[in-house]
Amino acid sequence: MKLRLAIVGAGPAGIYAADILLKHERAFDVSIDLFDQLPAPYGLVRYGVAPDHPRIKGIITALRDVLDRGDIRIFGNVRFGEDLTLDDLKQHYHAVIFSTGAVKDADLDIPGIDLPGSYGAADFVSWYDGHPDYPREWPLEAQSIAVVGVGNVALDVARVLAKHAEDLLPTEIPANVYEGLSSSPVTDVHVFGRRGPMQVKFTPLELRELGELRDVDMIVHDEDFDYDEASRNAISSNKQVFVIDKVLNQWRQRETGSASRRLHLHFFAKPVEVVAGEDGAVSAFRYERTEPDGAGGIRGTGEIREVPIQAIYRAVGYFGSELPDVPFDAERGVIPNHEGQVLDHHNEQVPGVYATGWIKRGPVGLIGHTKSDAMETIKHLVNDQASWWTPAHPEEEAVTALLEERGVAYTDLEGWHRLDEHEIGLGEPEGRARVKVVPREEMVRVSRGE
């Protein structure tokens, strides 16, 4: 029997799942259709990685190789729940895997977090990465900015805010983003983390890149480096922590005061409140100084400090979005599942419905985790053949006819090649790798050759 499989979400998780199924040791005749709400594939690799990260974006090469084999069909610019429903999928496929990721900001529950001048880091990332569903402009009017969080996204946001816009020109940064960052009056970016410098979530690579910014002083504070035993053990037992310690201590020795911008790292700083000014907008960030508790955690000291700011970005994690007619855990922001098998509110397996990637396990882990995640899900999908759906219209042309009948201007692999070549062509006169097309309508028009 030929399996017709739908995968909703064309980021790394969805592409890896398709590739693993096609190469499975118990491989059978399978036809895979990959759907995404965006006209272009690759998900957060295209729209969640800072433009000055070409080494990380190299993962696109591997994803491109999978798609270019031609054994996976892509339908871009198709919104699940609007253009195509779960009932539609049951009519045309034997099963579906949801790999829609997590793109919203997690909440930071402190007073004042909703004041004017307070933003989610994920929204800012989508803006500077040229996501087609976000506004073209971003309010960059603050001289002093807070970034709450010590993961890779927090450092990306801090780096883009502190970096001089002209130093981003060799990248694929969209024109509107360059213009916005060029007009920014920023002088100081403050990054805050609740725990110590040896308990951060960012990688040594991210940290090193901060220290390479032109005309930006790195400010660290000696009081944060009185290590407890847990931190010393982490340095001696973990190579990444060892490198982070080495980099931060090198920064402590640097001369500062000559740069036009400063990037401050504040550790042992638990968010307490975003303070409003007379105009009702953000005017300061208030935090409690913490200290090690002797057991690997932290405790409050009762000492409250305040830093004047005019904008704040929360970078405390991503959160998944609910999908129509699909079970959802609103507390964790994931599709409830057992190793990728989706569960209903009675904790019973939902036949034919699977999940992989961040919508399955939450927004943790790197690309390597996504591959092992997909392998786990595919193992169950293959073993669950007896519970697959029985589609009334499994023919490959049936879903194409349905989308065309509904007037959905979908894009395909050939269309992505068109858009890719178009963006590369836009960058060539300026000596850039590409200039990303931002408006959805233009992406669709170029992709469809209209």
Image (cartoon, rainbow, N blue to C red):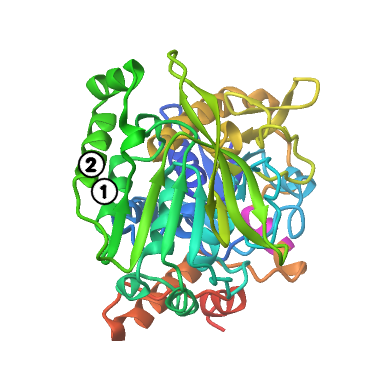
What amino acid type is highlighted by mark number 2?
Val
Residue in front for this viewpoint, 358 or 388: 358
Circle 2/circle 1 CB separation < 8 Å: yes
For mark 1, give the secondary structure. Answer: helix
Q: Quadrant of the N terminus?
A: top right
Q: Position of residue 129 (x, y in %)?
A: 48, 64
What amino acid type is highlighted by mark number 1?
Arg
Residue 94: image quadrant is top right
Magenta stretch prevailing secondary structure: helix
Q: Quadrant of the C terminus?
A: bottom right
The residue sitting at 57% across, 62% down in the picture is 310
Q: Position of residue 41 (x, y in %)?
A: 50, 59
Q: Is residue 200 left or right of residue 101?
A: left
The residue sitting at 66% across, 43% down in the picture is 107
The residue that disc 1 covers is: 208
Q: Count residues near mark 1 (Cα–Cα under 10 Å), then give few for <14, some for 14-19, many for 20+.
A: some
The magenta region covers 396-402
Residue in front for this viewpoint, 372 or 57: 57
For mark 2, give the secondary structure. Answer: helix
Residue 350: image quadrant is top right
Q: Count residues near mark 2 (Cα–Cα under 10 Å), then give few for <14, some for 14-19, many for 20+.
A: some
Instruction: Tell me which label, 2 or 1, sits earlier in the chain.
Output: 1
Residue in front for this viewpoint, 308 or 212: 308
The residue that disc 2 covers is: 247
Q: Is residue 91 left or right of residue 282?
A: right
Q: Nearer the viewer, mark 2 or mark 1?
A: 2
Q: Position of residue 420 (x, y in %)?
A: 41, 71
